[in-house]
Image (tube, rainbow, N blue to C red):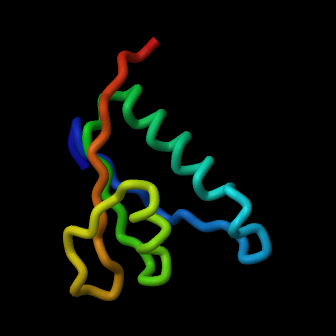
Amino acid sequence: MSEQTACVRTVAIRAERQGKGYGRMLMAGLEKFASQHRVKRLLVNAARDAVGFYEALGWAVIEAGGENPVLTKELRTRPQW
């Protein structure tokens, strides 16, 4: 979206694999990658039933009125090695 803001697109874990930590691992890796590339803020248009998942990972709802709520997370940037 910009040099400091990126949008997370389509995050999905198969139903039979949910609840095993794969989503948390995926998001941790994504956040690390983004921060290493100097992204300071992530945005996601989440499915309504995924909002709790994102909130548990420190994301905050910034727009709840649409079909897919928008959440954001501020990142601490890390130097690229």
Q: Residue furthest top?
A: 81
Total of numbered circles in the picture?
0
Q: Nearer the viewer, residue 64 or 66?
A: 64
Residue found at x 46% / y 11%: 81
Q: Residue reaching furthest right? A: 16
Q: Nearer the viewer, residue 78 or 5?
A: 78
Vertically, is 60 above or below 36?
Answer: below
Q: Quadrant of residue 34?
A: top left
What residue is shown at x 47% (from left), y 34% (from top)?
32
Snapshot quadrant of residue 11:
bottom right
Q: Nearer the viewer, residue 58 or 3?
A: 58
Q: Residue at x 50, y 65 (%)?
A: 10
Q: Residue at x 72, y 77 (%)?
A: 15
50 left or right, relative to 4: right
Residue 51 on image: x %, y %: 42, 74
Q: Give residue 66's position: percent from left, percent from top.
A: 26, 86
Indicate the position of residue 27 as horizontal and vertical percent values.
52, 50
**Left/right of residue 67 with respect to residue 50 in the rendered view:** left
Compared with 21, 76 (above or below) is above
In the image, 22: left or right of 41? right
Image coordinates of residue 12 in percent, x first then y, are: 60, 67
